[in-house]
Amino acid sequence: MLIVGGGCRGRQFARELTAAGHAVRITTRSEAGRAAIEAVGAECWVGTPDRLATLRGALDSVTLLFWALGCASGSEDELGALYGPRLELFLTQAIDTTVRGFVYETRGSVSRELLAQGESTVRAMTERNVIPAAFLTADPGEAEGWVADAQEAVGALLGVG
């Protein structure tokens, strides 16, 4: 599994996934995030959605892909690109890989309009390419509920639980 946007709740979720025997890779923008990611048993990948080429190799051997960026920060233009053309291009790149499920975070501190735009893009791309998708609706400010929602998404996409 690849979690783009690891942060605190992504690492908490990764801890549970690795404890259950799953291989997890989490992205971080810089080496400064490596120790916290590796401490939960996940593989660290230094890359950013601001430069998609840095994430291309992160897709190797990934079955489920999480776009957990509902609390991303940046200028209006940067966030607009993140939830528009960058998300669409990243999904286009993921189609020709081992990715067989996509999880999208629908809530967070990013504007509702941008989150809805991203959700629309995910729905269109995954439907067109017959890739199952799940949508996290839990409040990212409530880590336990978010992790439970993410676990449910994994179970649904893997056909378990």
Image: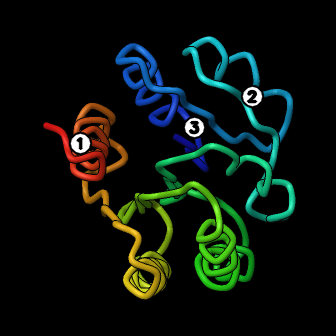
Q: Examine the rendered structure and indicate whether residue 7 appears above or below residue 75.
A: above
The residue beneath circle 3 is 7
For the point 26% across and 59% down, which residue is it?
A: 137
Residue 12 drawn at (x, y percent): 44, 25
Residue drawn at the location 21% of the way across and 50% of the way down? 156
Q: What whole-number distance in Å separates the C-alpha atoms at marks 2 and 3?
A: 9 Å
Circle 2 residues within 10 Å: few <14, some 14–19, many ≥20: some
> Which residue type carries mark 3?
Gly
The residue closer to the viewer here, 81 or 125, is 125
Q: Position of residue 62 (x, y in %)?
A: 58, 46
Image coordinates of residue 155 in percent, x first then y, are 23, 42
Give the secondary structure at mark 2.
helix
Q: Is the residue 91 above or below the residue 23 in the image?
A: below
Mark 2–mark 1 CB contact (< 8 Å):
no
Looking at this view, is 161 or 61 the one in front?
61
Are the residues at dot 2 and dot 3 in contact (C-beta closer than 8 Å)? Answer: no
Amino acid tagged 1: Gly
| Left or right: 71, with 57 as reference point | left
Q: Is residue 65 above or below residue 43?
A: below
Do residues under tags 1 and 3 come within 8 Å of each other at their CB atoms? Answer: no
Which residue is tagged 1? 155
Q: Which class describes the residues within 10 Å of circle 1: few (<14), some (14-19), or many (20+)? A: few
Q: Residue furthest left?
A: 161
Residue type, numbered disc 2: Gly
**Could you say which quadrant of the image residue 31 lies in?**
top right
Secondary element under disc 3, as helix, strand or loop, is helix
Q: Circle 2 is placed at which residue position?
A: 33
| Residue 88 image point, x, y percent | 62, 81
- The local secondary structure at tag 1 comes to helix
Between discs 2 and 1, the one toward the N terminus = 2
Eye-nearest disc, 1 or 3: 1
